[in-house]
Image (spheres, rainbow, N blue to C red):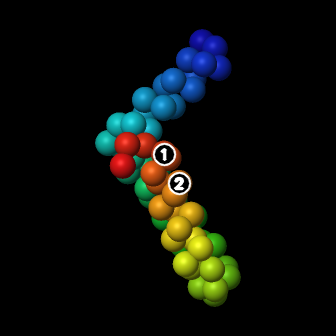
Amino acid sequence: MGIGDLGGKAKDFLDSDKGEQHSDDALEKGSDFIGERTGGKYDEHLDKGVDTADKRIGDE
């Protein structure tokens, strides 16, 4: 299995419903963690970042 095969499998997983849910959960947890650490100071920026990342990862 080459690196291309591994990348293809990762993309297939992220494009699945289960992968979409996992990526959404990870983005939300990361955003919540940073928001807590910064006292909510950057919540607007975090929300934009999460939305942008979510559009690029998975199928939704």
Q: What's the residue type where badge 2 is placed?
A: Ala
Residue placed under numbered mark 1 in the picture: 57
Q: Position of residue 10 (x, y in %)?
A: 51, 31
- SS type, badge 1: loop
Which circle marks residue 19 in the picture? none
**Residue located 59% across and 73% down the image:** 45
Q: Is residue 40 above or below residue 52?
A: below
Residue 33, quarter of the rendered image: bottom right
| C-beta proximity under 8 Å, tags 1 and 2 | yes
| Quadrant of image for the N terminus | top right
For the residues labelled 1 and 2, the Cα–Cα distance comes to 6 Å
Q: Is residue 11 above or below residue 27?
A: above
| Whether residue 26 can be seen here | no
- In this rendered view, identify the residue nearer to me: 59 or 40: 59
Q: What's the residue type where badge 1 is placed?
A: Ile
Q: How many residues crowd mark 1 within 10 Å: few (<14), some (14–19), many (20+)? A: some
- SS type, badge 2: helix
Q: Is residue 4 left or right of residue 10?
A: right
Q: Is residue 40 left or right of residue 60?
A: right
Q: Is residue 19 left or right of residue 2?
A: left
Instruction: Please identify the residue farthest to the right as the structure is shown.
Output: 38
Number of numbered discs visible in the structure rendering: 2
Residue 13, quarter of the rendered image: top left
Residue placed under numbered mark 2 in the picture: 53
- In this rendered view, identify the residue nearer to me: 32 or 15: 15
**Residue located 43% across and 29% down the image:** 12
**Residue located 51% across and 24% down the image:** 8
Q: Position of residue 59 (x, y in %)?
A: 37, 43
Q: How many residues crowd mark 2 within 10 Å: few (<14), some (14–19), many (20+)? A: some
| Whether residue 51 can be seen here | yes
